[in-house]
Every structure is written in structure tokens, then in C-alpha cells.
Image (cartoon, helix red, strand yellow):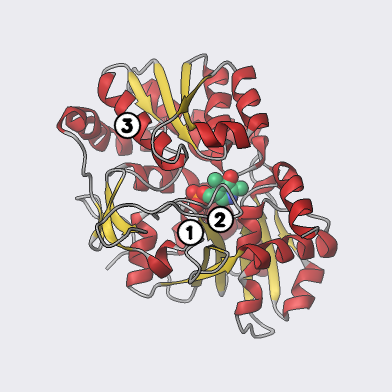
Amino acid sequence: MSFLVDKEGYYGEFGGAYIPEILHKCVHDLQQSYLPVIESEIFQREYRQLLRDYVGRPSPLYFAKRLSERYGCKIYLKREDLNHTGAHKINNTIGQILIARHLGKTRIIAETGAGQHGVATATVCALMNMECVVYMGATDVKRQHINVEKMKMLGATVVPVTSGNMTLKDATNEAIRDWCCHPANTFYIIGSTVGPHPYPDMVARLQSVISEEIKNQLQEKEGRDYPDYLMACVGGGSNAAGTIYHHIDDKRVKIVLAEAGGEGVETGKTAATIALGKTGIIHGAKTYVIQDEDGQIEEPYSISAGLDYPGIGPMHANLSAQHRAQVIPVNDNEAIEAGYELTLLEGIIPAIESAHALGALPKINFKPTDLVVLTVSGRGDKDIETYLKFKSL
Ligand SMILES: *Cc1c(COP(=O)(O)O)cnc(C)c1O
């Protein structure tokens, strides 16, 4: 049995495509075409060239000597923070915009929470000269002013969404509504391993360049192409999926994922979907969802805007249900502390999302011989004010 997607778009009992009638043709066309396009020579040539010359790949696999001494094992950091636009999200948007072009689409839409996926999408739309509309909750538009200005500077139209709590979930609903109105010319670039099949698998494959590189870099540095542990943070799950993709069925490799505990899973102010979620449908997929007794989706909370999603990708729901991955909630204060620790030990200021992965390190009993690869999904430039605010509390 594999932990990758099956032919029907399921990971165990999770996944599938639960979509309105009007999108059936669109989604069906994408299900039929995404693999042939991704595997085609012409796609691969352009995708690889842009990853190299535009994104700056391969990203380094850096041996973190002082961090390793601190935790009594051998820790390598996969440096997605060094990518163009500062995180792993660009790997996915480059791939999806090339797929959109292959399918003859001329208009791109996206949803965004903190604005990171919006900026990564607006960036590739500028690069490819495509129309770009980004849906963003009105609350987030206010909170993430700089990213809104970046998207506009890149030529995108940012639409503030005023329904619901005016955050990511509502922006996603609005993007889906737009897609329903313009299925013929519009391609919806989803920012994580969520949404209806084939999105989770498509995004995982586009991010799997991360684990492909890890394999090669470990072979070169350690003489073996697998680690004992792979670690990453999980919001929707795309940097984690990219990190584990080529080792997902290799039982020699332990998988440890960090989800956002917020102020604590028992406080109600949390985004720990694996700890608290129940099976439900969100944004076109069956997965774990944080919901109340009536099945209403509850508003998640995390200090990290990139992790406060009330669902989780179906791949990760299944990895947890099958006990293939250990998913650990890391609270705000633990993540902030871990972010400061990495900064002082290695001179690397991580995104607060990535700091959650680092915050899981003290929760594991490593052996001195353990080889650990932890993905630093993004850089912390965008988070300096949050770091400072928290430190002064
Ligand atoms: C968006 C984001 C995440 C969370 O998204 P995933 O799809 O779970 O990877 C993590 N880290 C950074 C830096 C992000 O921008």
C-alpha cells in the first residue's frame, strides 16, 4: 500500500473531489491532463529552467552544527527560505501557471490568507503576462498591508472579501465562486495540498522537487540518500508534502510534522486540525476539519498567518490516521522561542511557520547518530514585528 494518491484521488478515506456541478468539466479536464502535462518534456524543460534561474534552485541543504549540538543529533536544514519571494510557495505557482498555459487558460485566480501565496501567484503572473485576481479576506487585507501592496505592484487585482470572518476560508469560498462563473478561461492556482483532486497531488508533485534534492544532497554529503527523520510544519501541507514525497513509503524514515497549537489545543484558540479535527468536507475534499457539533467550521487561530487553516491536506490526514506520520501541535510561545533559538545559533531568522517545525525538536528523543532533515519553509523578514511584539509581552 502506498501513501501517495490512488487513481480515484483518495489517500485512504481522505481526498476526492466534492464540487458543484458547474465545475465538473473544469476539474475533470484537469484530472485528465495534469499528469501528461507535468510529465511532458516541454513542461519539464521550462519548469526546471525557471526553478534554476528564476527561483534559485537547488536550495542548499545546510548542516546546522550548533543546532545539532543543542539537540544531540545531526540536523540538516533544507533552505526553502532562500528561494525567490522567500518561501517554498513559488515552486508550486511556477508549476501551476505553466500547466494553466498548456491548457490554454488566460486568466488566473488565487486565494490568499497572509498574502504569501497571493504574492507568489502575482509574481508568476507578471512573469507570464497573465491577468491575476487574488481573493483575500478584508481582515487579512488590513493585517497584511505590505503583501497587498506587493501584489498590486506586481499588477494583480486584490479583491477584499467581506463574508464570514473575512479571512482565508472566506477568500477561498469567493475564489471558488469566481471559478464557477468563469470556468472556460480561468485557472485557479491553489496554494497548498488542499482542494478537490487533483490539486493535493498536483501541488505535492510540484513541491516534490524539495525531496528530490534532499535525496541527492544527502547522498553527496552523507553517502546515503535517506535520513532517519524528516520534519516540516503543516498548514495545508505543501512544504511538508514536498519534503517527504520521495520517502513517503520508505519506513526507514520517520516523519514528524508540526501543526499550529496556537495558545494551546485545549484553549479553543488553536489551528491544530489533527489534534481536534473530525472528518468532514472542506473546499472540495474530505479531510479532518475543525468544526462544532453542528458541523459548522470553526475559526482557527495561530500566531502564524500561514498555518491558521481549519482543515489539512488529505495526504496528511491519512498519514496521521495510519500512524505513518507523527503530528505534533506546537504552540505560539514554543514556536517564537524556537525562532529566536535558530536565529542566535545559526544566524537564520525563520518564518514563524517554519519556527513551528523547529519547535517540535525539543519534543523528540533523538539518538546521537540520528540524521534529521528539517525544512525551513520560509524566511522571517515578514514576521519581525510579530517576533518583537511577542518578546515584549
Ligand atoms: C504558506 C506557508 C506555510 C504553510 O503552507 P503549507 O502548504 O502547509 O506548506 C508554511 N511556511 C511558509 C513560510 C509559508 O509561507
Q: Quadrant of the N terminus?
A: bottom left
The residue labelled by disc 2 is: 302
Disc 1 marks a residue whose amino acid type is Ala
Work out whether mark 2 precedes mark 1 in sequence or the reverse, and give the earlier one: 1
Residue 99 at x, y percent in the picture: 39, 28
- How far is the residue under mark 2 from the one under mark 1? 6 Å
Residue at screen point 43% across, 32% down: 96
Disc 3 marks a residue whose amino acid type is Ile
In this view, 158 is above or below 358: above
Residue 258 at x, y percent in the picture: 54, 65
Q: Are marks 2 and 1 in contact (CB under 8 Å)?
A: yes
Residue at screen point 21% across, 30% down: 23
Q: How dense is the environment of label 1, judged by Cα within 10 Å: few (below 14), some, or many (20 and up)?
A: many
Q: Are marks 1 and 3 in contact (CB under 8 Å)?
A: no
Q: Quadrant of the C terminus?
A: bottom right
- How far is the residue under mark 2 from the one under mark 3? 24 Å
- How far is the residue under mark 1 from the one under mark 3? 23 Å
Q: Are marks 2 and 3 in contact (CB under 8 Å)?
A: no
Residue 271: numbered disc: 1
Residue 251 at x, y percent in the picture: 43, 75
Residue at screen point 36% across, 47% down: 200
The residue labelled by disc 3 is: 176
